[in-house]
Image: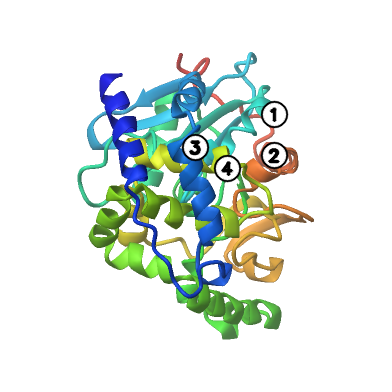
C-alpha cells in the first residue's frame, strides 16, 4: 500500500511539472490528440481523479493466477452456478486490458467466464523476458483453461485478442467450439493474394493499405523500436495519456468514455508499468494460421479500425454468421455491451451445434 501511495504521489508531482508542448496543429484531431482534450485529461488526473476507488472495484473481481514462472496467467474467473454452463473466454487487445469487458461481465452471469490479463498488459504478472508472441500467449491461455478444467469453450476477442483466438482455434480444434471475433487478424493482409480473393475482398486490401499509411505509424514504432518508445511513455504521464487517449477516442463512438473512464484505462498502464511490455505482441514474430475452420460469428462495428467485409473475412475464417451493427467501435464490449453479449450468445450456440452432446467441462466441475 505504501508503495502505491508513493507511486500516486510521484504521478501527481510529474503531472504538476508537465511541460506543455505547442504545435501549429494543436486542435487538429487528424494530427493526433487534441491539445484541449489532453489538457482536460491532465487537469483532472492531477486534481480530483481518485485511482483508489477504481483499484478497489477492479480488485473485487474474482481474480486467480494459473501456472507459474513466465507461463503464469492472471485472469478473472467468473463462475456460473451451473457447473455445466457454457464457457466463454474473453481476450482483450491494445491499448486496453481486461477493463474492456467490465460492462459485459454482469450480462454473462449464466456462463463460466474467463478473462485473461494477457501477458505484458495491465494486471498480468511482470514480463521480463523476450518471446511473448501471440502464438506463445495462445499456448499459455490453452494450458490455463486446461488447468481450470474446461474441455470446450467459445473464444471471443479482437485486436491482439483476435490473433490469439485464431491461433487457439487452429491449434486446439477439439477444444475451441466456436469463435466470436470483431475482426480477422490484420496479419492475413501480408500474405493474401488479391488474385485469390473476390473483387470486393481484393478492394478491401487496398483500403486497409491506405489505412496503414495514414494511421499505422504507432504500429511501426511499437514493432521496431519498443525500447525507445517505452522510455518516452513510461517516464511521462502526459506522454502516456496522449498516446493511449488518442486511440481510445479515435477508435470508438463519440462519448464512449467519460474523462474518468479514460483515466482509469490509462492509469492501469501507469501503475502497472506495462506500456513497454504491451508492445511485445507487436515486436515478437508470429505466424497466423492461413485459415481457421472453427465456426465463427464476426461482429462488425462501424467505428472499428479497418472493418472488413464478409467476403474478405471468410477467405481466412469460417464465417457462419456476419452481424453488422449501427454503432460501436474497436472497444465494442465496452461501448455496446448488450449487442456484444447477444452476438457472443449466438456464437456459443454455433459451438453447441458442433458439439451437441459434449459438456464444456472435463472430469467434474471447474477447478475452484
Can residue 169 be seen? no
Please report whichever mark, 2 or 1, sits nearer to the chain's N-terminal start: 1
Position in image of residue 9 (x %, y %): 31, 31
Q: Which residue is label 3 attached to?
A: 264
Q: Nearer the viewer, mark 1 or mark 3?
A: 3
Q: Residue at x 46, y 13 (%)?
A: 368
Position in image of residue 179 (x %, y %): 60, 47
Please report whichever mark, 1 or 3, sits nearer to the chain's N-terminal start: 1
Q: Which residue is label 4 attached to?
A: 259
The residue positioned farthest toward the bottom in the image shown:
195
The residue positioned farthest toward the right in the image shown:
326
Q: Which residue is label 2 attached to?
A: 337
Q: What's the CA distance linking mark 2 and mark 1?
A: 8 Å
Please report whichever mark, 4 or 3, sits nearer to the chain's N-terminal start: 4
Q: Residue at x 34, y 31 (%)?
A: 8
Secondary structure of the residue carrying tag 1 is helix
Position in image of residue 214 (x %, y %): 52, 77
Circle 3 packing at 10 Å, graded few (<14), some (14-19), many (20+), is many
Please report whichever mark, 4 or 1, sits nearer to the chain's N-terminal start: 1
128 or 46, which lies in front? Answer: 46
Amino acid at each position: 500500500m505504501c508503495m502505491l501511495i508513493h507511486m500516486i504521489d510521484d504521478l501527481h508531482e510529474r503531472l504538476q511539472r508537465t511541460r506543455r508542448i505547442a504545435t501549429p496543429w494543436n486542435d487538429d484531431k487528424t494530427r493526433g490528440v487534441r491539445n484541449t482534450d489532453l489538457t482536460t485529461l491532465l487537469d483532472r488526473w492531477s486534481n480530483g481523479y481518485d485511482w483508489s476507488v477504481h483499484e478497489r472495484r477492479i480488485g473485487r473481481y474474482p481474480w486467480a493466477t494459473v501456472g507459474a514462472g513466465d507461463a503464469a496467467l492472471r485472469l478473472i474467473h467468473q463462475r456460473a452456478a451451473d457447473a455445466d454452463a457454457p464457457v466463454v473466454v474473453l481476450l482483450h487487445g491494445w491499448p486496453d486490458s481486461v477493463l474492456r469487458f467490465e460492462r459485459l461481465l454482469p450480462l454473462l452471469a449464466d456462463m463460466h467466464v474467463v478473462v485473461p490479463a494477457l501477458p505484458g498488459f495491465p494486471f498480468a504478472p511482470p514480463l521480463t523476458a523476450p518471446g511473448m508472441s501471440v502464438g506463445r500467449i495462445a499456448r499459455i491461455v490453452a494450458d490455463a483453461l486446461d488447468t481450470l478444467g474446461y474441455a470446450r469453450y467459445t473464444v471471443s476477442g479482437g485486436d491482439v485478442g483476435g490473433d490469439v483466438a485464431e491461433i487457439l482455434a487452429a491449434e486446439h480444434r477439439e477444444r475451441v467450439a466456436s469463435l466470436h471475433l470483431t475482426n480477422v487478424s490484420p496479419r492475413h493482409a501480408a500474405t493474401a493474394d488479391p488474385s485469390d480473393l473476390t473483387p470486393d475482398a481484393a478492394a478491401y486490401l487496398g483500403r486497409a493499405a491506405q489505412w496503414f499509411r495514414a494511421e499505422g505509424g504507432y504500429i511501426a514504432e511499437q514493432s521496431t523500436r519498443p525500447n525507445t518508445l517505452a522510455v518516452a511513455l513510461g517516464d511521462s504521464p502526459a506522454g502516456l495519456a496522449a498516446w493511449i487517449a488518442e486511440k481510445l477516442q479515435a477508435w470508438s463512438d463519440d462519448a464512449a468514455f467519460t474523462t474518468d473512464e479514460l483515466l482509469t484505462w490509462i492509469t492501469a498502464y501507469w501503475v502497472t508499468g506495462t506500456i513497454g511490455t504491451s508492445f511485445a505482441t507487436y515486436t515478437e514474430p508470429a505466424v497466423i494460421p492461413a485459415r481457421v475452420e472453427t465456426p465463427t460469428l464476426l461482429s462488425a462495428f462501424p467505428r472499428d479500425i479497418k472493418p472488413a467485409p464478409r467476403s474478405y473475412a471468410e477467405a481466412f475464417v469460417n464465417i457462419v454468421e456476419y452481424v453488422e451493427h449501427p454503432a460501436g467501435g474497436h472497444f465494442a464490449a465496452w461501448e455496446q455491451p448488450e449487442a456484444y453479449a447477444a452476438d457472443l450468445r449466438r456464437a456459443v450456440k454455433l459451438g453447441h451445434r458442433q458439439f451437441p452432446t459434449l459438456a464444456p467441462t472435463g472430469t467434474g466441475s471447474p477447478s475452484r
